[in-house]
Each structure stands twice: as C-alpha cells, then as structure tokens.
Image: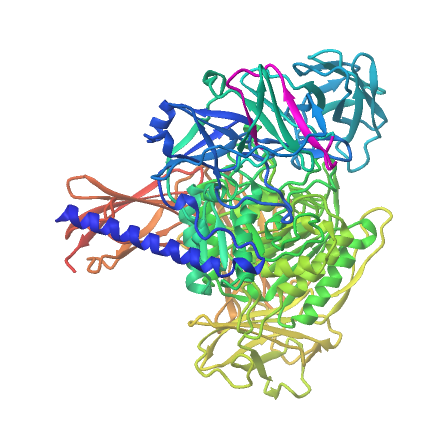
C-alpha cells in the first residue's frame, strides 16, 4: 500500500504539473496578439531529465555514445539539444532575442550525434567597414547547451528544396575572418575591456594567422586596436611585407588611464600564413603599449580542407544577384549546411561533379554556410559535461511579483528570510532565484548579466499585457567584480553575481559599473543608458560570505521591525568638505536648509569641516575635532548622514574625516542611511572592499543602506542629484509612509534625463526598505510653557525653571491619542546663530551659515493616556541675546507607534537671578564595562566607560565651548581628551540625573588612568578618576547565567547571559549534553550587545531538530569576543512533559 500510495502521489503531482502548464500556455495565447513579447509560459526545463554541457568555440560538436550513456540517454534518435550557446546577449531590447531554450537541430551519425554550437566569440558584418568585426562575451569563456531524451523523435537537420533560381554569378571564394585577442590586464580595473600583450621600449611583436588556400588576388583587411599610457604623443606601427601604417596615440589627459587607438589597413596577401608585426614607437621612456586585438579578414578559395569549412561571401550583399557557389576538393560525403539560423539549420541540395559541389543561393541576405563531412567523427571536438541531472525549474511560470531577489545558492536561506519578512510586513510578493536558474532560462545557461534584466523584462512585459502587477524592486544579493569572467585569481571569492560594466575601460569618466542597467525595461531601452528611465528600484547587498549575508539580513530585519526607537530618528547630519571656493559647503547648506524647511520635525546637524580647527602635521591636514563630533553623532544615532565633497574608496575627504578603519570599528545600533556625493566611496566591483561597502557589511554598526558612488563623479551633477534625493527620501504618501528606497532612487534618477553622472550612483541596501522615520506620525504638541499657553507670548531665561506640558495627537488629527502610553524625548535648543567658518586653507574665504549649535537640555519623560509633562532648569551657558528657541520632540509607545513634534513659539535670552545658588558639583559614580568594576581591575582593550550622575539643579550637557563640557581624559594626555555630551542619557522623568555610556578607543596594554569631569547648570564641576589595567585578549566573564522557564514545559526556553562585555559583538556557543556526556546539540550565534545582558532563545531540540525527551540536561555556554579568549559556564536545564 505504501508503494501504491507513493505512485498515486507522484501521478497526482504530474497531473497537477501538466494542468498548470496547460493553463499557463492558454493564458499566454490570449495575449500573444497584443504586440508585447510576453515570453514562453513554461520553460522546457520544467520537466524531464537534463544534462548541461559547454563548448569553448563555435563549430560542429560531437556527443559520443559514452557521453550519451553518462547523461542517461539510451536512444540517439530521441536526443534533444536545447540552447543557443555563448554569444553575448543583445543589450538593446530592440534587437531580436531567443526566449527560454529553443531546440537546436542535430545530425545523428550512428552511435554519436553532431550539432552546431556557438562559442563565446560572435561575428557581425559591418557594411560600412566592409569587413567582419567580432564580439567577445565579457561574462563567459564558454557557450552552454542542455541535452535531454524524450519519447518524441529528435529535431534533425533537414534538407531544403533546391533553389529554382537561375544563377547570375558564380563564386569560388569566400571571406574568412580570425582574431587574436588575449585578456590579460584591465588597465583601469574598471569596465569590460581587458588588454593583452604589453609593449615597452621600441619592442616589436609578430602575430601569425592561418588561412589555407588564400586567394592572393584579393586584398585582405586588418584592424588593430591598442592602447598606450603616456603624457606625450606616441604611435604603434603595423607592418606586413612593409609598413601598412601607424596607430597614433594622443597624450593621456587628467582622467585617462590610457589612450586607445584603432588602425584599419588593406593588404595584399602573399601566403596562407600571414604574419603581422606591431612595434611601439617610443617617444619617451614612460610610454607603455597594450594590444587589445587584431582582426583579420582574408579571402580564401572555396576549397574543402579538413572535416568542416565555414564560409560566407558578403561581396554581393543586398544586390539583386543569384549566386552559384562552387566548392572544390569536396569528398563524396561532404554536405552543405546553412547555419545562418542556428535553431533551424538545413542541408542545402548540392550538385556534384566529381569532387566539385555547387549550390545556388540568393545574395539578398548574408548567409553562413558550413561544408561538412559528418563521417569524419574523429575530427570533431566533444563538449564538456558540466552537470548531469540538472534540477527541473520553471521561472517562466512564476506568478507576477513585486520583488525579485537574485542570490547565489549559498545565500538563498538568508535571502528567503528577508523575502518572508517583506511578505509579512509589507504585503509584498517576493521571489528568490539563483543566478544559475536565470542563466538556464534566459541566456542558454551561459553567464550573462543581461539575463537578470531579461527576467525582469518578462515580468514587466506581462504586466503591460495585463497579466498582473508590474515588478517594483530588484535586490542583487551578492557582490560582483569588474573581472566578470574570473580571469584574475584575486577575484574568485568576489564574483558572487555578475555586474554590468561599461565598454570603456580607459577613462575615469566614461568607465563605470551601474546597477541601473537592470532596471531599464522598456522596449527601446539599452541603447542610451543615460537617457533611459528606470522602471524598478534596484539595490545590492555586496556580500561575499554567508556570515556577511546573515549579518546584513539581520540588520535589515531589525530595522524593519523598528527594533530601536529613539530621538535618533529626528536627527540628520549634513557634512561638507572644505576648499574649492566653499562649493561643497554651499551645496550642502542649500540641501540642509531645504530639508529643515520641508521637514520641521527634523533636527538638522551641520558639520562643515572648515568650521573646526585644522591640524597640519607631517602626514597631512586633518580635522580631529570635526571627526570626533561626527563619530559621536554616528554612535548616538542618525536617521540620515549626507556628505558632500572629495573622497575615494578608502575615506571621505582628503583630511580623512571618515576612513574604512573608522567604519569597520563602528558600534552603533541606530544606523543611518548614508548619502555620499563624492567619488567612488562604495566601489563594489574592485578586488578590495571599499569603505562604503564596509558601512553596510559592519554587523554591529555602520549604516543601514547607502545612496552612494562607485566611480568618479562631478560636483555640479552630484548637487542636482542630491537635491532630488532629499526631496524624495522625506516624501510621505497619503498614509504618512515614506517611499521605499528603491522608489526614492528611481524617482531621483528619472528626474535627471540625459545625465550620465547618475549612472555612477547605486543603492547599496534593500530597495524595498523604508527610511525609519515615524509613519504615520503621531504629532507631539506643546500645550504650555511654565503655565503659559503655547499660543501666548513666552520668554525663558538662563537659570530659570522650565515646565513643559503637552500631548500626542492622532495622525492627521487634532484629537489626543488617549491610549498613547510610552516615552517622550525632549531636546531644547538655543537660538539660530550666524556661524562663520575659519578659512583654514591658504587662499580660502570664510563661509557663513545658520545653525543651532547649542542644545540646552536633553530630557525624557513618560506619556500617560496621551499627555506628558517635564521640568528642567535652563543652564547658565546660553546666548543671552533674545531670540526664538526650539523644542524638538520624539515619542514612542509600547504598541510601536511613534510621533514627532516641534515648538518654536518662545523666546530665550537674558538671565534669571532668583535661583538659589549652591557650590556643590554633581554626584558621580564611574565604572568600566559593568557597575561591578573596582578601580584597578583588568579590562579588555576597548572597554565601555559608564557614569551615573546626579545634581539637584540639573546636569550641564551644553558645554557651549567655554570649558564646561562633559569630558573623559585618559592618562592626563591631551591627545586622549574626549567630549561626551552627546552620550548623556537623562533618567526618564528626572532632569536631575542621568548616565553616560562611551566606548573608549583601543587602549594599549598596561596600566592607565581615566578622569571624568561633569558640570551642573550653575557651572559647578566634579572630577572623578579611576585606574585600570588593559590585558590584550582578556576573556569575558560571566556575572550570572540562567534560563527561563526552567523547568521547560512548552518546548522553548531563553538563556540569559549577564557578562562584563557590553558594546561588543559577542560570540556565543551553547553545547547541550545529556547526563552521560553525549553531545546532543550545538548552537552558535554572534550577537551585538549594548548592555551587559544578552538573551538567546532555544527551541529545546537536538541537532536533528527533534524535541528533547523529558529529563535533565547540561548546557555549557562559551562566550568570547573577537581575538579574545573563551569563558565558559554550565547551566542545568530540566525538560518536563508538555
């Protein structure tokens, strides 16, 4: 019965599959007449047993009987070969395209079969040049096909009817072609063009070709492309039986890696083996030349040599002529095939006169012929078997989808996690596919980046034909490399997905990588990318390992889950480089002002480097104060970080205000969207990982996504793009929700038609992710200040009490949200000031801008039933002139609802002298890592500084540049002096107390001291010092360990680890043993810990996923940090019956 049931199940599934295929086919027939290419309803790979093979060159291929047996094929008469080989797919959608895997006809020769295969080099006739030109597939060195056996007879090469035309011209010659091209070096490490042999000095190289039975009465043509690197003019001479001419290279310009040159020359052949000599003519010792390719077109007599002869004759193309081809030396078994259409190869009837074959053909269209003796089996090469039993697949039958994720098989499980999250949270339909699956159905199994675009085109066209919704987002889940074919050993781990590279590889402006290419889906797209309009949003995760994939998905899901609420969602930061006649500051300030005006709830931080002291040393210029400020802002959390200025793939600004090392060391849970209007900060197709990539790849910090650059970009174009981006990224729809990042990118770029600079910007991150500002927004409203209604005239002074009352309204309503119970974070800022930069660079001028640099108060309070109140004292350190202050607010509750508010209807200035003075500084307790720390204890190299402070008048977090900052000083060294105002976190509902958590920079091994200084609002200070010893590789330590519930009654428990390593990535391994010591399971995870407590869930199963039986088990927990020793502790777990 079991066997019968299994067979019934199989038959049922087959029936269902056949029904679905039939429904799909009927569905697409109904719209096939609409004029829109909608692609096949099903792939041939959806059923049957398949083998994948590949060839390295174009020509006749033989599959032997032994190979057929290896493929599981028993009957050559029923063999089917599908595919179209290795020619690069057309990038313009106006070109003809073969969908899925069309069948290729075969010739059955007894115990072997022959078929005509296309390799990675293709040829096209250029009627203007009157010669053939070649194209090398930049993605693959092979062409791929698929082989299967069915019950139906094989598609064989058939014989056409003989032409009844009367010949007007008899021809006994043809135009042959050959190319010499080696891919050895990419001079710019950019673009798709690799160059070959290197020429230095006045050296020359000769290159030989073979053209048997050359027709020496007709001229040949040679076309040479080469490049030279030099600041002066140079040339390369081309010679054959004397000089043919010289290729001239102009001097390389500012943005040139090298200058390309092409020379085309006619020559008269004198033998079947012409040899051409190239010589670099050096004008200076700095000239280096590189050969790209040599194309040769040479006429040959139409005389059979070997087992096959490919021929064609373009001399009579488009003439009203009927040609009679005459082939001599043709053995008795020679046949003529017309291989112009490789999916419909036919045998041409030929008349024989002894060893001469003749046949007739029209000259209207260029035809490709093959003379073949199929009986010479040993003369034909065999394909390489790549994979037997190719899994069935059917991407063509996928339902219309909102989002496609392309992920290598190693990353599919992580891609599936993200896809499921989007399905649950965003109600998006998402499919995850592998690149190999796409190649199999959209590029004949041959790797080709255009196949990704063809998949998206299928969904797009079907939507246009009324078959469902259009696709919206594409996530490329994997890094790529400009070396798409893997020519370099250093690129192997980086090539997870293909990247689209420009044709240019010699100029910094013209050479680029662009993910936009995959989003151009209209029928006319693919010719002029700068003018094409994006139809979908495209993003990329530049991951190369499973660990990176998991880390990025973890970050993205946590961001989607709104895991970290807080005031950071009100904060954005605009950073501007110095120099260039203040251009970068002017551009950043324009966008910052627009952002502030359009989004009044945002607190715009302006960090213009020239506003800070510049330090000049032997290593160059730097802005240490600006850098510290920026790193502090990133650590405390930002919604968006926007940089304008110079940069490269290792740092921002020549002064290195942010470096790759800074990024990789970041530990910040509240992660910003980074916008970098600078050169190649996120070049994600190079052999080194860029600083921009590290922003996303950092598992414990960095940023959540980047709108960023991969190549050289220009300031004016960046400015135009950045303005559009700022408008779109903060746009809210009718429901108050932000646009998804892919839509922001799409709308931004489409607003700038014809701008090629935009192609160098990409979205690194999830295109279906929304910026995490509160949406819908519950408005936070001030009702009164010091008992005065908010709509009345209000003035507050230094040292005066401040009592605020307010409420939270429902979105888009003036009604109080009466069930809003949560927290309200309030920040009070002093007046707008005219700020003047320092004109640090020689010859520069100051730049004047407006900012609110001084925060007077940071406090947190509770909201109950939609209402809140808070008290504080305005510090002494304010600007005593009167002007409008600002209260900025953020609220969140336990239901995940969030709100923002802003209040500026009050004046601030002057002083209140009625406050009772006292001379006591704040009460302070300081620690490292945990509150169990005792001065003199041993710590790790990057300990977390902790402080608890309290003062009856309140804590001064202003500083205001006059020595009243909250500071940390290490070893009394001025170079290790840190301002920690931004790290003060007030106690909820109590303005008099709060805490500080600050990750110290890496400390040297040995003994150190730390002094913390803090002031109250009356400017009374307290200093406190502790001592500590840094031990390299110090193991973390357990403070406590327990699990709950314990006993376990419902098949689930949580391990709670309290340890002394906050603010690090903690590696945890939980090993589960029975009482006999047998290992049952091992759980491994890495977790980011802001506090000293870490919780890890466990579903109480063994390593096979089976639930543990009731009993007592021992769980050993090992914890460690990077480059640290392991600490272990054991916990007893009791499992009971449910």
Q: In this view, does 1116 lie to the left or right of 811?
A: left
Residue 324 point in image, percent of width and height? 66, 27
Magenta-colored span: 316-339
> Which image quarter: residue 914?
bottom right
- Could you tell me which quadrant the C terminus lies in? bottom left
**Could you say which is closer to the camera, residue 739 or residue 289?**
289
Q: Is residue 398 left or right of residue 907?
A: left
**Could you say which is closer to the camera, residue 567 or residue 20?**
20
Is residue 188 shown above or below 1040? above
Residue 61 point in image, percent of width and height? 49, 25
> Which image quarter: residue 279?
top right
How many marks can you see? 0
Is residue 273 shown above or below 388? above
Magenta highlight on residue 544: no
Residue appearing at x 44%, y 82% in the figure: 865
Q: Is residue 1085 visible?
A: yes
Q: Can residue 935 be seen in this view?
A: no
**Could you say which is closer to the camera, residue 362 or residue 1136?**
362
> Which image quarter: residue 285?
top right
Is residue 377 shown above or below 314? above
Q: In this view, does 300 lie to the left or right of 106?
A: right
Is residue 252 shown above or below 1011? above
Residue 63 point in image, percent of width and height? 43, 25
Q: Is residue 402 left or right of residue 1066?
A: right
Magenta highlight on residue 326: yes
Residue 176 point in image, percent of width and height? 67, 23
């Amino acid at each position: 019965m079991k066997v019968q049931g299994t067979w019934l199940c199989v038959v049922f599934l087959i029936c269902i599959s056949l029904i679905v295929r039939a429904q799909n086919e009927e569905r697409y027939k109904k719209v096939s007449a609409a004029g829109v290419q909608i692609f096949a309803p099903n792939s041939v790979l959806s059923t049957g047993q398949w083998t994948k093979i590949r060839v390295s060159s174009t020509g006749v291929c033989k599959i032997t009987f032994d190979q057929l047996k290896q493929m599981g094929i028993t009957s050559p008469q029923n063999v089917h070969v599908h595919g179209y080989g290795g020619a690069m797919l057309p990038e313009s959608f106006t070109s003809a395209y073969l969908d899925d895997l069309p069948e290729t006809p075969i010739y059955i020769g007894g115990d072997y079969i022959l078929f005509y295969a296309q390799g990675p080099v293709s040829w096209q006739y250029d009627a203007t040049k009157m010669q053939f030109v070649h194209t090398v597939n930049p993605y693959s060195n092979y062409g791929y096909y698929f082989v299967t056996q069915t019950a139906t007879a094989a598609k064989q090469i058939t014989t056409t009817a003989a032409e009844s035309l009367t010949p007007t011209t008899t021809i006994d010659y043809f135009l042959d072609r050959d190319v010499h091209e080696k891919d050895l070096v990419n001079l710019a490490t950019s673009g798709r063009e690799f160059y070959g042999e290197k020429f230095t000095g006045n050296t020359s190289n000769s290159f030989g070709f073979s053209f048997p039975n050359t027709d020496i009465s007709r001229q040949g043509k040679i076309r040479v492309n080469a490049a030279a690197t030099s600041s002066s003019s140079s040339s390369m001479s081309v010679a054959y039986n004397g000089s043919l001419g010289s290729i001239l290279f102009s001097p390389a310009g500012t943005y040139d890696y090298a200058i390309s040159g092409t020379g085309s020359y006619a020559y008269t052949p004198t033998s079947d083996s012409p040899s051409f000599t190239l010589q670099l003519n050096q004008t200076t010792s700095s000239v280096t030349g590189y050969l790209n390719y040599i194309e040769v077109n040479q006429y040959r007599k139409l005389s059979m040599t070997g087992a096959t002869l490919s021929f064609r004759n373009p001399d009579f193309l488009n003439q009203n002529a009927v040609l009679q081809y005459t082939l001599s030396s043709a053995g008795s078994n020679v046949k003529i095939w017309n291989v112009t259409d490789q999916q419909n190869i036919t045998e041409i009837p030929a008349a024989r006169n002894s060893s001469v074959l003749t046949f007739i053909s029209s000259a209207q269209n260029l035809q490709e012929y093959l003379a073949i003796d199929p009986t010479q089996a040993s003369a034909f090469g065999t394909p390489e078997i790549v994979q037997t039993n190719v899994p069935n697949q059917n991407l063509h039958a996928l339902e219309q989808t909102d989002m496609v994720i392309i992920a290598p098989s190693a990353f599919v499980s992580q891609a599936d996690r993200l896809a499921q999250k989007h399905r649950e949270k965003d109600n998006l339909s998402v499919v995850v596919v592998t690149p190999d699956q796409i190649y199999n159905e959209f590029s004949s199994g041959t790797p080709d980046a255009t196949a990704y675009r063809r998949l998206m085109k299928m969904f797009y066209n079907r939507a246009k034909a009324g078959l469902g919704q259009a696709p919206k987002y594409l996530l490329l889940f994997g890094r790529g490399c400009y070396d798409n074919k893997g020519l370099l050993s250093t690129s192997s781990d980086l090539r997870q997905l293909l990247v689209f590279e420009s044709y240019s590889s010699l100029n910094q402006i013209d050479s680029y990588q662009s993910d936009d290419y995959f989003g151009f889906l209209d029928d006319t797209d693919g010719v002029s990318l700068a003018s094409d309009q994006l139809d979908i949003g495209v993003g990329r995760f530049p991951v190369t390992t499973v660990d990176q994939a998991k880390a990025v998905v973890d970050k993205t899901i946590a961001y989607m889950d709104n895991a970290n609420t807080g005031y950071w969602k009100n904060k954005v930061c605009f950073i501007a480089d110095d120099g260039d006649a203040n251009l970068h500051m002017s551009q950043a300030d324009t966008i910052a002002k627009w952002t502030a005006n359009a989004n009044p709830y945002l607190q715009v931080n302006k960090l213009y480097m020239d506003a800070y002291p510049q330090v000049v040393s032997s290593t160059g210029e730097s802005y240490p104060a600006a850098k510290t400020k920026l790193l502090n802002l990133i650590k405390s959390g930002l919604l968006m970080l926007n940089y304008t200025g110079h940069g490269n793939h290792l740092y921002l600004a020549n002064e290195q205000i942010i470096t790759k090392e800074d990024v990789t060391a970041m530990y910040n849970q509240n992660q910003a969207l980074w916008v970098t209007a600078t050169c190649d900060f996120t070049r994600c197709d190079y052999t080194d990982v860029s600083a921009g990539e590290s922003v996303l790849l950092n598992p414990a910090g960095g940023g959540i996504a980047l709108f960023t650059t991969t190549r050289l970009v220009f300031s004016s174009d960046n400015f135009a793009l950045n303005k559009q981006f700022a408008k779109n990224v903060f746009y809210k729809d009718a429901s108050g929700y932000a646009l998804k990042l892919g839509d922001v990118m799409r709308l931004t770029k489409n607003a700038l038609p014809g701008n090629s600079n935009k192609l160098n910007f990409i979205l690194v991150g999830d295109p279906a992710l929304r910026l995490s500002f509160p949406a819908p927004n519950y408005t936070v409203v001030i009702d009164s200040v010091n008992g005065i209604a908010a709509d009345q005239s209000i003035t507050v002074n230094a040292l005066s009490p401040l009592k605020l009352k307010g409420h939270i309204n429902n979105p888009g309503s003036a009604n109080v949200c009466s069930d809003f119970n949560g927290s309200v974070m309030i920040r009070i800022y002093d007046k707008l000031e005219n700020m003047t930069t320092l004109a640090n660079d020689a010859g520069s001028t100051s730049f004047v801008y407006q900012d609110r640099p001084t925060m007077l108060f940071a406090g947190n309070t509770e909201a109950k039933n939609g209402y809140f109140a808070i008290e504080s004292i305005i510090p002494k350190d304010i600007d005593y002139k009167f002007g409008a202050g600002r209260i900025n607010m953020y609220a969140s509750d336990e239901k995940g609802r969030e709100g923002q508010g802003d209040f500026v209807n009050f004046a601030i200035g002057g002083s209140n002298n009625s406050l009772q003075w006292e001379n006591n500084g704040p009460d302070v307790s300081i620690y490292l890592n945990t509150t169990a720390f005792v001065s003199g204890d041993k710590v790790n190299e990057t300990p977390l500084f902790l402080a608890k402070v309290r003062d009856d008048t309140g804590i001064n977090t202003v500083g205001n540049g006059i020595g009243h900052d909250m500071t940390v000083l290490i070893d009394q060294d001025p170079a290790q002096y840190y301002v920690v105002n931004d790290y003060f976190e007030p106690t909820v509902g109590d303005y008099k107390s709060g805490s500080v958590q600050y990750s110290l920079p890496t400390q040297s091994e040995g003994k150190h001291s730390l002094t913390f200084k803090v002031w109250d609002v009356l400017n009374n200070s307290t200093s406190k010092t502790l001592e500590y010893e840094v031990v390299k590789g110090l193991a973390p330590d357990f403070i406590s360990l327990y699990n709950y519930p314990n006993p376990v009654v419902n098949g689930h428990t949580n391990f709670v680890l309290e340890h002394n390593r906050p603010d690090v990535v903690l590696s945890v391994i939980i090993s589960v043993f029975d009482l006999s010591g047998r290992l049952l399971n091992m759980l491994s995870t890495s977790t980011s810990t802001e506090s000293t407590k870490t919780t890890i869930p466990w579903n109480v199963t063994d390593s096979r996923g089976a639930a543990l039986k009731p009993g007592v088990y021992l769980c050993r927990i090992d914890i460690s940090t990077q480059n640290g020793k392991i600490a272990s502790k054991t916990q007893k777990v009791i499992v009971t019956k449910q």
